[in-house]
Image: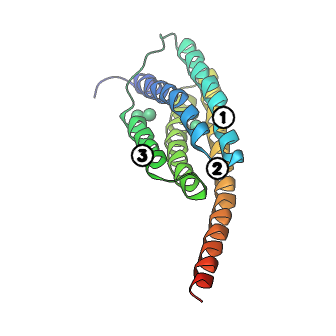
Amino acid sequence: MTGTIRDLLIQEMQDLYDAEKQLVKALPKMVKAASNEELSEAFGSHLEQTKGQVERLERAFEALDVKPKNKACAAMKGLINEAKEEIESNQKGPLGDSAMICAAQKVEHYEIAGYGTLKAWAEELGLDDVAALLRETLDEEKEANTKLTAIAGKVLADSSREESQESLEEARSHR
Ligand code: ZN
Ligand code: FE
Ligand code: FE
Ligand code: FE
């Protein structure tokens, strides 16, 4: 390819800009679909953070003297489609929540990969203001992922409690 790392940085920022905007649309569905209150709240607060991340990317474009532009992120479209399938095919409760957490963590990891790489490029190019903006979002994505891991543990404990309750009842009914 032709161009420079700076061009590549801008292209990848355009990809993340589109990805974040897709998430602003998708996250309200996750807020509604989550049964666990803590999970629903986590999706809600990440929705607000995500809106801020869109603005942060706009500031980074500005710092680079380019207009914010979308480059359709096919990967995020796919990840969101998978999340939608999980919501539609799983029942409410711990099982559905676990499936949604799985989908959401795939999203966070995609974002962590993107922002981590772009932050390193911006640092290498001496674009300190851009690097700082990307780092702020990177930290939020990592935090969101850690929070999901913690909630996943609780949801899983709930689901195994439910399952052992069910098998207990099963066993009793066969007595
Ligand atoms: Zn993307
Ligand atoms: Fe994000
Ligand atoms: Fe992408
Ligand atoms: Fe995120």
Q: Which amino acid does label 1 sit on?
A: Gly
The answer, for residue 128, to whether it is visible in the render is: no
Measured from the top left, where is residue 161 in percent x and y? 67, 69
Above-or-below relation of 159 to 4: below
* Residue receiving disc 3: 85
Which corner quadrant of the figure contains ligand 1?
top left
Q: Looking at the image, is mark 1 or mark 2 nearer the viewer?
A: 1
Instruction: Residue at 55%, 43% (x, y): give it.
Output: 108
**Image-quadrant location for residue 144:** top right
* In-front residue for pair 105/141: 105
Q: Which residue lies furthest to the left in this view?
A: 1
Instruction: Residue at 61%, 37% (x, y): give it.
Output: 31
Q: Which of marks 1 and 3 is nearer the N terminus?
A: 1
Measured from the top left, where is residue 15 in percent x and y? 43, 28
Q: In this view, does 25 lie to the left or right of 45?
A: left
Which class describes the residues within 10 Å of circle 2: few (<14), some (14-19), or many (20+)?
many
